[in-house]
Amino acid sequence: MTDAARRDELAASLAQVRERIARACVAAGRAPDEVALVAVTKTYPASDVVLLAGLGVTDVGESRDQEAAPKAAEARAAGATPRWHFIGQLQRNKVRSVAGYAGVIESVDSVRLVTALENAVAGRPEQLEVLIQVSIDGDSSRGGAAGDDLWRISDAVAATTALRLGGVMAVAPRDWEPDRAFEQLAVLAAQLAGKHPGATTISAGMSGDLEAAVRHGATHVRIGTSLLGMRNLLR
């Protein structure tokens, strides 16, 4: 496929996704500009990031550092400088690399990871935004903070000078109805914002459930398949 054809394909998908977000916002009694799109580009090439940036996409999500780091560098060399969101489980030995390109870490789920991130970005003029990944069903084996860990982690982030607590992120458990999952997340998000007033971001909702996420207050939706197409897992 030529670059022009791929650009047209992405432009059409982007228009459809933005229309879905706008309709979901209207249905929820919210303004469309209250919900930001994070384009999840994992398994897709840097050329797609460049094209999306040219179409006005400002936020891009990746989940594996070994793919994201060179992709971010390639996109930057081509003139595309979106804000990169790291949305996958983050190992502490990858922290320094991820902090080198990511503007937001959405998957913070331990105090030890907070400490590692703080050390990695200490001395920088700008703070690194972090979201606490919440395990909605309490099964932290898939990543995410459960129970009182949310409060311990949020207090640890707030006590740093190098990090800024943005809010929460979650994925609806597969065996839960999305409305039930995101309603529960909204309760936790409100409690967190009550304790830390600046922590108002709620990153929730993907291609299959963005409408439910918007109904329950999502400020960011992470869209991959509906925007870029079905992933080729062999890439």
Image (tube, grey):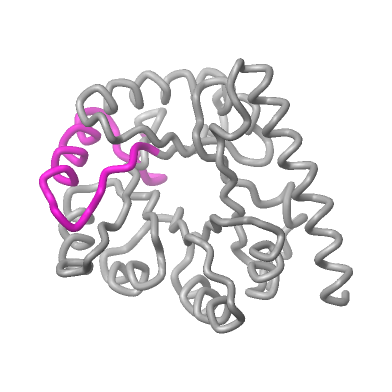
Q: Tell whether position 157 is magenta.
A: yes
* Residue 139 picture location, percent across and down: 37, 35
Q: Nearer the viewer, residue 224 or 178?
A: 224
Q: Which residues are magenta?
A: 139-168
- In the figure, 203 relative to 197: above or below? below
* Residue 115 picture location, percent across and down: 15, 57
Q: Nearer the viewer, residue 183 or 202?
A: 202
Q: State the residue at coordinates (42%, 39%).
A: 169
Residue at the extreme left:
159
Q: State the residue at coordinates (59%, 63%).
A: 42
Quadrant housing the N terminus: bottom right
- In the figure, 3 relative to 91: above or below? below
Q: Tell whether position 137 is magenta.
A: no
Q: State the residue at coordinates (61%, 81%).
A: 78
Q: State the residue at coordinates (79%, 50%).
A: 13
Q: Is residue 230 left or right of residue 151?
A: right
- In the figure, 61 relative to 168: above or below? below
Q: Nearer the viewer, residue 205 or 100?
A: 100
* Residue 77 picture location, percent across and down: 55, 84
* Residue 52 picture location, percent across and down: 68, 62
Quadrant housing the C terminus: bottom right
Q: Is residue 34 left or right of residue 11?
A: left
